[in-house]
Image (tube, rainbow, N blue to C red):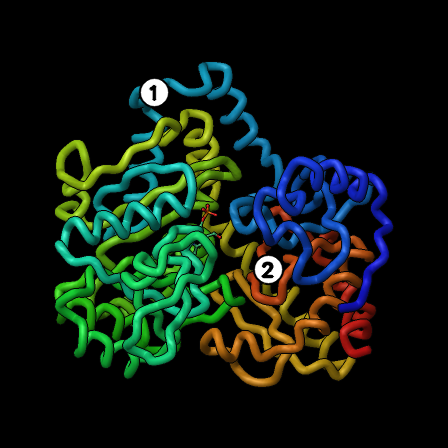
Amino acid sequence: MTAYPSDAPASQALLDRALAVTPGGVNSPVRAFRAVGGTPRFMVSGQGPYLTDADGREYVDLVCSWGPMILGHSHPAVLEAVQQAATRGFSFGTPSENEVALAEEIVARVEPVEQVRLVSSGTEATMSAIRLARGFTGRSLIVKFAGCYHGHVDSLLAQAGSGVATFALPDSAGVPKEMAAETIVLPYNDIPALEEVFAERGADIAAVITEASPGNMGVVPPLPGFTAALRRVTAEHGALLISDEVMTGFRCSRAGWFGLEGDAGYAAGAPDLFTFGKVMGGGFPAAAFGGRADVMAMLAPTGPVYQAGTLSGNPVATAAGLATLQHCTDDVYTRLGEVSDALTTGVGEALDAAGVPHVIQRAGSMFSVFFRDGAVTDYDTARAQDVPAFAAFFHSMLDQGVHLPPSAFESWFVSASHDDAAVDRVLAALPTAASAAAA
Ligand code: PLP
């Protein structure tokens, strides 16, 4: 891979300190820039669409903390809510009103969700939803799709085995093979593979978990009919359908991907369970899982499925999440769409002009640029792209003050605070970056 010189001495100094005390110098692997090379920028502040790094350089932020910062950084109303909540106390270890209000907001937005339980991360949400599905059905197998990420849950860190109906192999050291064997990994958007697995093992399958519209292999929306097939096949076999909206929830629309896919996708019925995170925490650790009341009733203390958390429903985090959702108005979604329209058009034109093969895919305002020709429909097609071209593009954008996700397999995230000035700064950087990708 090309070696990118670091012109970020303060970030480099912080990275050197971090490397001494933290594996890889980071607290979440993708932040380490391993996929693109170079020095990750240590940020010191965020305001609206901008981040400022330790060297005092300002960037237009197209990561938005991997999704949560839908209103932009340090939104005044969210800041005010957080400050007020913090003044009243940091954590009570008792129920508090904001938890109820946040749950009410989620239930009001996503029609099939009758009840929710708050947790602190998307990983906890999916882990708990899976335990609940197993407890409810009395079955243990889980079906997931290659390229979908649901957090670092043991049984979901699995990769496809050799045949469609074979059990998965661990995708991480430390995951017992017995645990991975409880998971079946299928190609995304492949209805025959789904039907085949259910024909063979349907009576043992507790749930299918899917990203509502995948964003973790880049943005790969479900092909027409796939979501409906998931619902139909699971229902036929008495398995639950878990729609992971940690990334898409409250971002793709006010009701997440569910709101966008609408009756066309969910004509056969809504998912039984949903998982949420990111936007609903407003940048703080808050996430949730929820769905059918009869399934949720299986949770402790009403039912036998145990689930708990010292900081679940934390008063400061719920204040941030509630204020964020309350400010996610129709105008916000309109602006997100406008920003994504402008950026996808600009990226496409710049890459066309430079002769760089690419395809841009969108789910609401989430979008990805794949450096390849032809649609991406699953993990195999997502992987067949020119990753070095992306790395060159990424570094050129970074050098010009635009902070993109440091991997070719991620969604770009915009916020409602991305005004025309911020968009124009991105557009101005594109031709140079496209030329770098072409080189
Ligand atoms: N599910 C999806 C779809 C995600 O994108 C993520 C994180 O990116 C998770 C679950 C895990 O969430 P967290 O990182 O908050 O544990």
- For the residue pair 264 and 128, the one nearer the viewer reads as 128
Residue at 74% across, 46% down: 41
The answer to whether the beta carbon of the residue marked 2 is less than 8 Å from any atom of ligand 1 is no
Percent of width and height locating residue 224: 35, 78
Q: Is residue 334 left or right of residue 310?
A: right
- Would you place residue 77 above or below residue 32 in this image? above
Q: Residues within 10 Å of mark 2 (few under 14, many from 20)?
A: many
Sequence-first tag of 1 and 2? 1
Percent of width and height locating residue 417: 62, 46
Residue type, label 1: Gly
Q: Is residue 241 left or right of residue 366?
A: left
Residue type, label 2: Trp
- Determine which quarter of the picture holds residue 338: bottom right
Find residue 335 and name its label.
none
Q: Are marks 1 and 2 in contact (CB under 8 Å)?
A: no
- Would you place residue 329 above or below residue 319 in this image? below
Percent of width and height locating residue 214: 44, 65
| Element type where label 2 sits in the image | loop
Q: Is residue 108 visible?
A: no
Which residue position holds label 2? 412
Q: CA distance from mark 1 to mark 2?
A: 36 Å
Task: Report the quarter where the C terminus lies.
Answer: bottom right
- Determine which quarter of the picture holds residue 369: bottom right
Residue at 33% across, 37% down: 118
| Element type where label 1 sits in the image | loop
Task: Report the quarter where the N terminus lies.
Answer: bottom right
Find residue 93 and name its label.
1
Q: Is residue 401 visible?
A: yes
